[in-house]
Image (cartoon, rainbow, N blue to C red):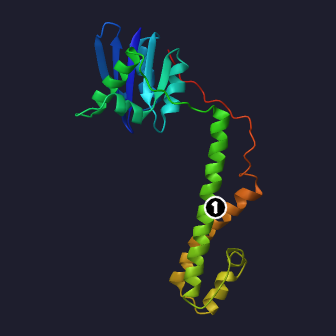
């Protein structure tokens, strides 16, 4: 059995593997599927590891579990509380995580299943589109009031609306700014019409497992 700690970065990932006796092996891999494949080929199948919770941690865990590894996701704040470090580098972080796995002290976090995460993503997308639409409305209102006009986004999307603004004396620079704001408002409205904001559970396709050979 090898005990593995992975410090996942944007481009590179530092890893450290410990045996039950404390023998250490470490290195770095590319932070992508090819890097994980090389790591699995090097360490074999008898591995128990962990990675700190961050963007992409669930994908890393699922990819490695598909290859027969046991992978936990650690709470980053609790890891710092258990093992505060004066020198913090990716390599040191990986060593700390590996040692926590070996000592069975990993402060794991609960990760919702894929269907629940899909519901959350739909809600976040809806919230994001609403913020975009509200920002577009407020910005458009501010631009038009500079020229004594008031129009809503629906009216501005009608044929000839921008020509009308030109006739009312709105300069081209302001009209161009308004034109760039219209897609943001229409995207939010379109998502509602297409049912993008529904939060009811749906069947979500499972990610394709990477090659573990």
Apparent side of residue 112 relative to residue 57 in the rendered image (left or right): right
Q: Name the residue under label 1.
A: 130
The quadrant of the rendering that contains the N terminus is: top left
Residue 52, quarter of the rendered image: top left
Where 111 sits versus 194, above or below? above
Asked whether residue 13 appears in the rendered view, the answer is no
Query: Quick one: which residue is furthest to the front in this view?
Result: 81
Q: Which of 40 and 76 is in front in this view?
A: 76
Apparent side of residue 174 relative to residue 130 in the rendered image (left or right): left
Query: How many marks on residues?
Result: 1
Instruction: Bin the neighbour count of mark 1 within 10 Å (Cα to Cα): few under 14, some 14-19, many 20 and up.
Output: some
| Residue 78, horizontal then vertical, whole percent | 41, 32
| Residue 141, horizontal then vertical, whole percent | 60, 80
Q: Which of 23 and 213 is in front in this view?
A: 23
Apparent side of residue 8 relative to residue 137 in the rendered image (left or right): left
Residue positioned 47% across, 11% down in the render: 45
Query: Quick one: which residue is furthest to the left in this view?
Result: 86
Residue positioned 65% across, 49% down in the render: 123
| Residue 3, horizontal then vertical, whole percent | 39, 15
Residue 36, quarter of the rendered image: top left
Asked whether residue 7 appears in the rendered view, the answer is yes
Residue positioned 63% across, 88% down in the render: 149
| Residue 120, horizontal then vertical, whole percent | 63, 44
Q: Nearer the viewer, residue 24 or 211?
A: 24
Under circle 1, the secondary element is helix
Where 1 sits versus 60, above or below? above
Residue positioned 56% across, 71% down in the render: 180
Where 160 sits versus 41, above or below? below
């Amino acid at each position: 059995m090898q005990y593995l700690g992975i410090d996942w970065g944007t481009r590179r990932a530092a890893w450290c593997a410990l045996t039950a006796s404390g023998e250490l092996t470490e290195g770095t891999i590319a932070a992508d599927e090819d890097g994980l494949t090389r790591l699995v080929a090097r360490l074999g199948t008898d591995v128990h590891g962990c990675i700190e919770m961050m963007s992409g941690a669930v994908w890393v865990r699922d990819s490695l579990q598909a290859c027969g590894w046991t992978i936990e996701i650690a709470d980053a704040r609790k890891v710092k509380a258990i093992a505060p470090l004066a020198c913090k580098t990716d390599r040191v972080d990986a060593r700390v995580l590996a040692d926590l796995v070996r000592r069975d002290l990993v402060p794991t976090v609960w990760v919702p299943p894929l269907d629940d995460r899909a519901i959350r993503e739909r809600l976040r997308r809806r919230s994001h589109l609403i913020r975009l639409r509200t920002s577009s409305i407020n910005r458009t209102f501010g631009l038009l009031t500079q020229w004594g006009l008031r129009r809503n986004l629906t009216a501005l999307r009608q044929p000839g609306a921008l020509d009308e603004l030109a006739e009312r004396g709105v300069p081209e620079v302001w009209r161009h700014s308004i034109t760039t704001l219209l897609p943001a408002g229409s995207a939010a409205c379109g998502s509602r019409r297409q049912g993008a904001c529904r939060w009811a559970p749906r069947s979500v396709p499972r990610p394709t497992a990477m090659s573990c050979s």
